[in-house]
Structure formats: structure tokens, C-alpha cells
Amino acid sequence: MNEEIELEEYAPWLVVGITLIGAFLRAFMLSDKGMWLDETFSVWLAGHTVPEMLRWIGEIDQHPPAYYLLLHFWMGLNGDTPQHTRLLSALFGAGTIPIIYLIGKRMSGAPMGLAASVLLAFSLFNIYYGQEARMYTLLAFNAAIAIYALIRLLTDARAVTPMGSQLRNYVHVWRTAGPVEPDPKAEFSYRDAAGAQSGWRAWVSRHRWLPISAVETDLAWLTFVLFTAATMLTHNTAVFFPLAANIFVLGLMLVQWVARADGSPSLQAPSLGNWVKAQIAVFVLWSPWLVFFIRQSRAVDQRFWIPAPTWDGVVQVAKSLLYPSAPLPTGQAMVIWIVYGVMLCLGVMH
């Protein structure tokens, strides 16, 4: 028990160290290799004005505009050298590490979060794409934040209350209730000290500001909606992300409805009304790209340079996840797969 308390205390510092190591691995030798075709295309596309860039994306590319827009403004600040353009991907790759820690911690405590962050920090696959001027680490970053928001909702009993009620109550209290009355026994009162203030400080002191915990459920809903839409606007295959989320959440709702078990399960499905509202909001944010998505999907289906997937291709992609920059000998690959299988079984059993 004491060991768990100590780990919980030092975990934030450990995550900072793990993130810095991950950032170093992704930023190391960024400019030592030439830019390949897709990277040069990213730089060329992001070098246009925003209207021209959006027009070209809709006509000749197969991806949404989120990454190109960020790269456009990033290049305006830092230039278009290989090091600077790839640094954006490296930052998103490193930024995903603490988010993965938060997901693991929320689900199963600090040890799980630390283990997950270490795996991502040293993931050769993530490091590889963290050194490429493409949208893949941004995709992982957005999806990780959306997943963290979803995990917060699934572990928060208040997720069944009407969406937006916390924010409405917060605004109502802020507008109608005065500041907290000072303690007459206290030697110092912030309210008394604010009496002589003017301007924005006086305006702040005239209102009651509830703690952030009073609106954290609504903020989780907002974060989930925004970053799910951002994920879909980063890569077209991310349309499967909300599909997977819906399968999981609706399945959880069904299981809990059938079981009708007493007690407090570790995961609690939100209300169906809140979930439907969130999906509608995601679709509304993504819908401006719907026409282009359909057009790009048809173009890929008709004349794309990547051949149609086969089972052998699926196996090769799975192998590349083990070591993306070079193939592994069969024996070593088998050992790694066995280790992954054992970890999967332990995770399911836990």
C-alpha cells in the first residue's frame, strides 16, 4: 500500500522524464535523412495560401485538411527545412505520451499509466512516424485525447445527467451569486483586499467562481466531441474511430441493461440521450468535409496506387508494427508476438 502511495506521488515526475526521453528519441537526427515523396508533397501543399491549399486538397489529395493547416502556420513560424517540418510531428508524438499515461491511470492506476507511457515512448513505430512530415502522429494525438475524455465519461457517474447542465449551473451561480463571504475570524480576507481594486481584478472579485470540478463532466463531453471531430479531420480512415467508440459504448449499454447488476461497475455507460447528442455534434463539426470525403473515397477506389488489400498484406502490416524500419527474422518476430500475447492475456485477466 505504501509503495502504491509513493508511486502515485512520484508518477508525475516520472512521466515528465519519460516524455522528455520520448521527445529526444523523436527529435534525434531529424534532418539527417532526405525527405521522401509524401513529405515533399506535404511541404508543397502547406506552402500555398489557405484557400489554394484547400482547393488542391479537394482535387488531388486523399486526406482531410487538419494536418496541412497546422503545417502551413508552423512553416510560417519556423520555415520549411526538413528539421523544422518534421519537428511538428515529433512534438505531437511526444505529446501523446503523457495522454497515454492519463488513460492508463484513469483505467487502472498509476502503474498501468506508467507502463503504457513507457511502451509508447520507446515504440519504434511511433518514433518512425514522429520523424516524418505527415499527419500520423497528429492522428494519434487527437485520438488519444478523445479516448481519455471518453474514459473519464465512462468512469464518471455524472455522465448520465443531462449534457450541459453543469455549465448552465456554473454560469447561473457566476451571474447571480456574490463572492464567498469572508471568514470574520480570519486575519486576512481576499475580499477585503480586493475592495480597493479596480478594472478586471475588481470584476473578478465581484463574482463567485466555482471549482473546475463543478463542470468537469461537461468539459469531458466537449473534449470528446472536439477531438473526435479533429481525429476525423486528420485522416479519412479515422471515420472508423467513432464507429469503434459507438460499438463499445452501445455494447456497454446493452450489457448493463441485460445484466442489471447491483453495485458500481468500473465502467458506467453514459445516458443514451447524451451519447446521441455527442454523436450529432461530432457529425456537425465533420460534415463540412463530407462532400470532399466522398469524392476522395471514390478516387481512391477507382485509381489509387496502393493495390487492394489481401490477407498476406494484412499479415505483413502486422509484422511491420513490430519493427517498422526493417524486417525482423522469423524467430525474433515470433518471440515478440509471444510476449505481446502474454501481455494481452494479463491485461484481460486484470
Image (spheres, rainbow, N blue to C red):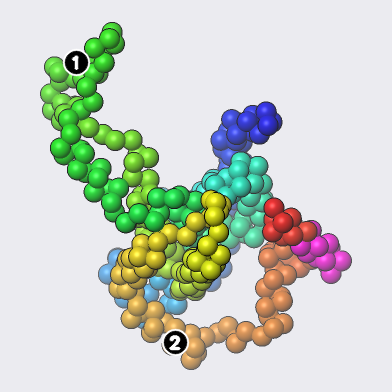
Could you say whether the residue bearing mark 2 is in a helix, strand or loop? Answer: helix
What amino acid type should be assigned to the residue bearing mark 1? Asp
**Residue 210 in picture, x, y percent from top left:** 29, 35
Residue at image mark 1: 192
The secondary structure that dominates the magenta segment is helix
Provide residue 96's location: percent of width, then percent of height. 53, 51
Q: Which residues are magenta?
A: 329-341
Residue at left offset 49%, top offset 56%: 268
x and y, in percent, of residue 155 in the image:
49, 51
Q: Circle 1 — which element?
A: helix
- Marked residue nearer the N-terminal end (1 or 2): 1
**Which amino acid type is shown beneath numbered disc 2?**
Ala
| Corner quadrant of residue 215 | top left
Specify whether residue 286 is painted magenta: no
Which quadrant of the figure has residue 341? Answer: bottom right
Give me the disc on residue 299.
2
Q: Residue furthest bottom?
A: 302
Q: Nearer the viewer, residue 76 or 187?
A: 187
Residue 29 pos. (x, y %)? 61, 50
Q: Is residue 25 above or below residue 57?
A: above
